[in-house]
Image (cartoon, rainbow, N blue to C red):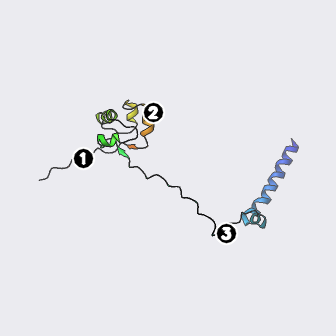
Amino acid sequence: MRNIWISIVAAAALLAGALPAAAQGSDAAKATAVPEEPASKDRVPAKKISTPPKQKLVNLNAATAKELKALPGGSDAEAARIIAGRPYNSKALLLTNKVVSEGRYYEIKSLVVAGEPAKAAAPKK
């Protein structure tokens, strides 16, 4: 048991001595830093990774049948079921009310939102 305590105290002493040197930016820490590569005329710039354009979220409560059908893998029957089940307080109601299957829900859940229903235009006076 005494040997374990001696090992713990020795390790603590080593750590206590190493931490201030690293915090001050010692020469040993600077020597291990990786130097930056100078710019070269022969180097070809790396290709930029293009991200796909952000798709606008489809509002389940206001979208037309055409917009709902435009979802990846959408169909006329699915759009009709979604419209018939309105209004939605949450997009999860698509799954709990069995409007779409579980697999289909996970395909479209990042593309839809249950927002405010579309307001009809006020009649002109």
Q: Quadrant of the N terminus?
A: top right
- Which residue appears farthest toward the left when viewing the image? 125
Residue tagged 2: 103
Tell which circle, 3 or 2, labels the residue nearer the N-terminal end: 3
Choose top left, top right, bottom left or bottom right for residue 114. top left
Q: What is the C-alpha distance between the residues marked 1 and 3?
A: 60 Å
Left or right position of 74 against 31: left
Q: Position of residue 12 (x, y in %)?
A: 80, 53
The mark nearer the N terminus, 1 or 2, is 2
Few, some or many residues within 10 Å of mark 3 (<14, 14–19, 20+): few
**Which element type, helix, strand or loop, lies under badge 3?**
loop
Residue furthest to the front in view is 42
Is label 3 or label 2 in front?
3
Q: Quadrant of residue 87?
A: top left
Which residue is denoted by mark 3 in the rendering?
38
Kindly identify the residue that appears in the image at 49 percent across and 53 percent down.
Answer: 51
- Return the disc, 1 or 3, that comes first in the chain's sequence: 3
Circle 1 crowding by C-alpha within 10 Å: few under 14, some 14–19, many from 20: few
Residue 27 at x, y percent in the picture: 78, 67
Residue bearing the label numbered 1:
119
> Which one is nearer the viewer's eye here, 51 or 6?
51
Q: Nearer the viewer, residue 47 or 53?
A: 47
Task: Give the residue drawn at x 27%, y 45%.
Answer: 118
Spot occupied by residue 77 in the image (x, y as percentages of width and height): 32, 32
Identity, as a three-letter code, of the amino acid under mark 1: Lys
